[in-house]
Image (cartoon, rainbow, N blue to C red):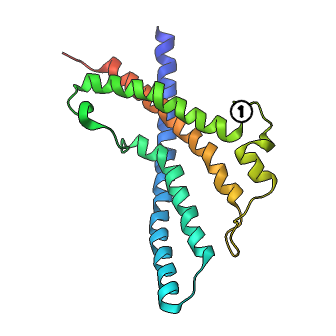
Amino acid sequence: MKLLQDEFMDSSKIFSTFDTWIDRVGNAISWCTVLMVLTTCLVVILRYGFGTGSVFLQETVIYMHSLVIMFGLAYTLKHDGHVRVDLLYNSQTPRNQAWTNLFGHLFLLLPFSLILVTESLGITASIPLERSYVGRSWSVFEGSAEVGGLPGIFLLKSLIPISGGLLAMQAIGETFKTIRYIRNSDWK
């Protein structure tokens, strides 16, 4: 039992480091929202003030939006900021909330994260990587279909499995925290 506790504590150090890293990524990526607002204002000024449009700038906003969403998933999970159906959760005792969180992490979030990774890379379909959703994009260095658009859609699609991996890691970390909370709390 002592060995299991030591391994559990070692894993909590690993996830503490991961939490710190997720915070840094989240804080850095949050600046994309400011850049999105400024870029959108620039697009509007160019379009309505000067009668010219820029597909490049419009797609830049889309790319930044994707970055914020994909890298923000794990950060938001860490800070318990995802939307919940609070009809039942808020009325539960802290113990039942912890068990609900544990169930959600293990049986909903973790499988979803793994499906996101495996399906985008074609792992579950046993297809070669170059024929997967992300792999096909990389094989042709997919770019924008619009004239003057951004190249590098293949990079954007690569965020899908990366995001799923980050979310899975954070789900595992949250599961460990919840288990520790359940084990160490006095429920009397």
Q: Position of residue 151 (x, y in %)?
A: 71, 66
Q: Position of residue 175 (x, y in %)?
A: 44, 27
Mark 1 belongs to which amino acid? Answer: Ile
Q: Which residue is mark 1?
A: 123
Total numbered badges shown on the rendered structure = 1
79 or 126: nearer the eye?
126
In which quadrant of the rendered image does the C terminus lie? top left
Q: Please report the residue visible at 48 percent of the width from the left and 46 percent of the height from the top.
A: 73
Q: Residue furthest bottom?
A: 50
Q: Residue furthest top?
A: 1
Instruction: Find numbered disc 1 in the image and state the secondary structure of the residue it sits on.
Output: loop
Quadrant hosting residue 54: bottom right
- Residue 74 in the image: above or below residue 47: above
Q: Is residue 137 left or right of residue 30?
A: right
Q: Please report the residue visible at 41 percent of the width from the left and 28 percent of the height from the top.
A: 104
Q: Position of residue 149 (x, y in %)?
A: 67, 71
